[in-house]
Image (cartoon, rainbow, N blue to C red):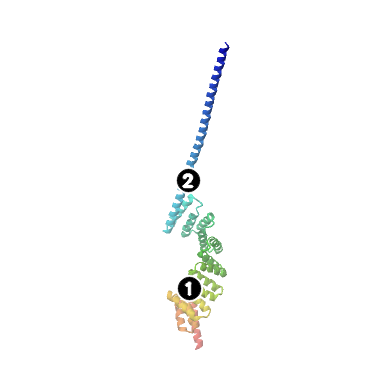
């Protein structure tokens, strides 16, 4: 009886142990399954994020390509003079990216060509707002202000253009012109001189510097500036200003040479003819002087002055008689 009981106990222990082992295995399997499930969820989440990133990048790439294509279309249309179509293309680019400063700049050019100046100002301002180093846009904005005769505003933005592109001879030149229009000849001379230092071949900068020097009473310096200008590019206007300055210095022979050179460039050019007459009058070559003044009087702007000089020569001759 005792043996039988012992066997039953042993059997019960075996069954209990087997059940325990079986339960442990099931629990381990469940934990492994949960672990694999968690890993899959993580992989799934990573794949979804990767796909989203790829899709987002694809959209960004498409948007980038579309805005660049619209910009190029605008530039091509602008060059061909189709300003309205160019404007539409630039607006398309800005519809994709409102911070696209280059498109704002192109829009400003199209609007300027269409004489929509206030809108052009806004476009250029947007360009520099989104890119504070955009020297070309500052320069274009300054030119619009110059056209609108807002010279103080023009000078301020030309300063910005120069700050961002210190080698911009054109910005120095345009700033000088604005100073000259404001009657600030000294500041104008400094700007024109800076332009010629950057670009020694800048003939119009030498010319304008000469004009400013005449206003400052710096006549000898003005002659040097005009001579530098005409050495680079012959112009009837520069020869006229050179002749005028020589006449102011009572250097009649040199004035006459300059004036005659102006008339060779443009026969019948009234300002040069008038200065030739003044030089000839100073040299007591009255008949020749009258001939030059008669050329000048054909121009309504010079008629009154030319007639006065002819009458004055006749008066001098009369007194001489």
Residue 207 position, x and y percent, is 50, 71
Residue at the extreme right: 2
* Nearer to the camera, 136 or 250: 136
For the N terminus, the image quarter is: top right
Q: Is residue 34 above or below residue 263?
A: above
Tell me if mark 1 has few (under 14), some (14-19) or many (20+) residues whose alpha carbon lies within 10 angstroms of its own: many
Q: Is residue 145 above or below residue 67?
A: below
Q: Which residue is mark 2?
A: 57
Residue at the extreme bottom: 321
Q: Is residue 75 above or below residue 59?
A: below
Q: Is residue 266 visible?
A: no
Residue 251 position, x and y percent, is 51, 80
* Nearer to the camera, 250 or 296: 250
Residue 218 position, x and y percent, is 55, 75
Tag 1 secondary structure: helix
Q: Is residue 10 visible?
A: yes
Tell me if mark 2 has few (under 14), some (14-19) or many (20+) residues whose alpha carbon lies within 10 angstroms of its own: few
Q: Which residue is mark 1?
A: 238
**Image point 51% across, 37% down: which residue?**
42
Residue at the extreme top: 1
Residue 247 position, x and y percent, is 51, 79
Residue at the extreme left: 80
Tag 2 secondary structure: helix
How far is mark 2 from mark 1, CA to CA? 60 Å
């Amino acid at each position: 009886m005792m043996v039988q009981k012992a066997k039953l106990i042993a059997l019960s222990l075996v069954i209990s142990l087997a059940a325990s082992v079986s339960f442990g295995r099931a629990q381990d399997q469940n934990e492994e399954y949960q672990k694999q499930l968690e890993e899959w969820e993580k992989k799934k989440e990573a794949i979804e994020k990767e796909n989203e990133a790829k899709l987002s990048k694809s959209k960004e790439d498409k948007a980038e390509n579309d805005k660049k294509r619209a910009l190029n279309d605008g530039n091509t249309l602008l060059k061909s003079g189709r300003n309205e179509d160019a404007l539409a293309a630039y607006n398309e680019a800005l519809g994709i990216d409102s911070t696209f400063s280059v498109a704002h700049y192109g829009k400003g050019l199209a609007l300027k060509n269409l004489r929509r100046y206030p809108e052009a100002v806004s476009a250029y301002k947007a360009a520099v707002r989104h890119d504070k180093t955009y020297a070309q846009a500052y320069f274009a904005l300054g030119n619009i202000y110059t056209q609108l005769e807002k010279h103080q505003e023009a000078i301020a933005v030309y300063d910005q253009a120069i700050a961002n592109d210190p080698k911009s001879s054109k910005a120095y030149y345009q700033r000088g012109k604005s100073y000259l229009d404001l009657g600030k000849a000294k500041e104008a001379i400094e700007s024109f001189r800076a332009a010629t230092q950057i670009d020694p071949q800048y003939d119009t900068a030498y010319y304008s510097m000469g004009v400013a020097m005449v206003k400052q009473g710096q006549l000898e310096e003005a002659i040097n500036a005009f001579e530098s200008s005409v050495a680079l590019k012959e112009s009837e206007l520069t020869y006229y200003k050179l002749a005028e300055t020589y006449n102011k210095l009572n250097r009649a022979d040199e004035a006459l040479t300059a004036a005659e050179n102006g008339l060779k460039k443009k026969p019948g050019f009234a300002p040069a003819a008038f200065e030739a007459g003044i030089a000839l009058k100073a040299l007591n070559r009255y008949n020749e002087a009258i001939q030059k003044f008669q050329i000048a009087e054909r121009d309504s702007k010079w008629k009154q002055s030319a007639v006065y000089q002819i009458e004055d020569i006749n008066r001098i001759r009369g007194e001489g008689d």
